[in-house]
Image: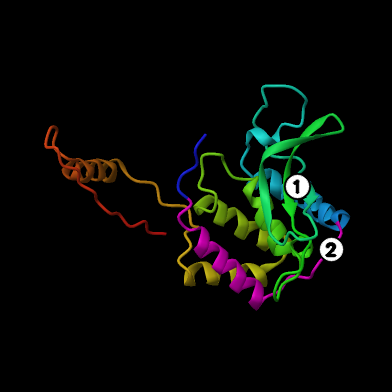
Amino acid sequence: MTRPRDSQRQRLYAAELAAAARVPAPTLDGTPAAAQAFVDRVTRSAWWGRQAHPTWKGDRDIGWPFRSGVPARILVSPGRSTMAGAWASDWVERRRGRWYPVIRLGTAARRDRPAAIADPWVILHEIAHHGIPEVAAAHGRQFARLYLGLVRRFLGPDHAGALRDEYIRHRVRYRQPPALTGEQRTERAARLAAHRPSTGSGRTFHSRTMAVG
């Protein structure tokens, strides 16, 4: 399954870095156990069960096919001592007879920020990747909205306010787009048809649209 183009990735990273610099989060002790306990607090919450989107990674039973569900647990995997980054794995890992989604967290020091495995900003970012549909852009509107909710719920309103401010400053789309009326859908279809190249013309026309949100 192919995701849409990740068009606002760099803007979201910039917003997160700026927000974390304005309102740092209390760091964890840097051990995998502490990071796993923080992740478990998120995934065991009723909030996560309501807000995260069901995905195939949410099924914890053995065997195929995986059923869609909200991930009930996400495993923390520490990176090598030279790894500073973090990422959410596209696959699940088997542990003690069950399958779980995984986030990999770097343990190396980073400039002006704690190691990824000790940084709640980074950990919540990676958790959010496992709470959006597979068809959504990796750092798109749905991701940004869920990440903001995670920050508000598990870091606090000051951190969420800083992140929302930086979203706006860096033009990160995170609000739910308004639903189109029947008339608006008809008008949009007419505009698209007007820009569609004529059959057999041998020429290709490109139109540029601007997403608002």
| Residue nearest the observer in this picture, 77 or 108 | 108
Residue drawn at x 19%, y 45% as measured from the top left = 195
Up/down of 77 relative to 11, above or below = above
For the record, the magenta segment spans 6-31
Q: Position of residue 31 (x, y in %)?
A: 87, 59
Few, some or many C-alpha atoms within 10 Å of disc 2 (few <14, some 14-19, many ≥20)?
some
Amino acid under label 1? Thr
Label 1's element? helix
**Above/below status of 166 relative to 106:** below
Name the residue rendered at 73%, 59% in the picture. 83
Question: Looking at the picture, does residue 99 appear above or below residue 38?
Answer: above
Q: Residue furthest left?
A: 201
What residue do we see at 74% from left, 22% from top? 63
Task: Between label 1 and label 2, give the one nearer the viewer.
Answer: 2
On the rendered structure, is 71 left or right of 196? right
State how far apart marks 1 and 2 are (Cα).
20 Å
Whether residue 161 appears in this view of the structure is: no
Query: Does residue 194 appear in this view?
Result: yes
Image mark for residue 43: 1
Give the residue type that dot 2 points to.
Gly
Q: Is residue 121 left or right of 3 when viewed as pictured?
A: right
Residue 30 colored magenta? yes
How is the protein colored in the picture? rainbow
Does residue 155 belong to the magenta stretch? no
Q: Badge 2 is on which residue?
A: 30
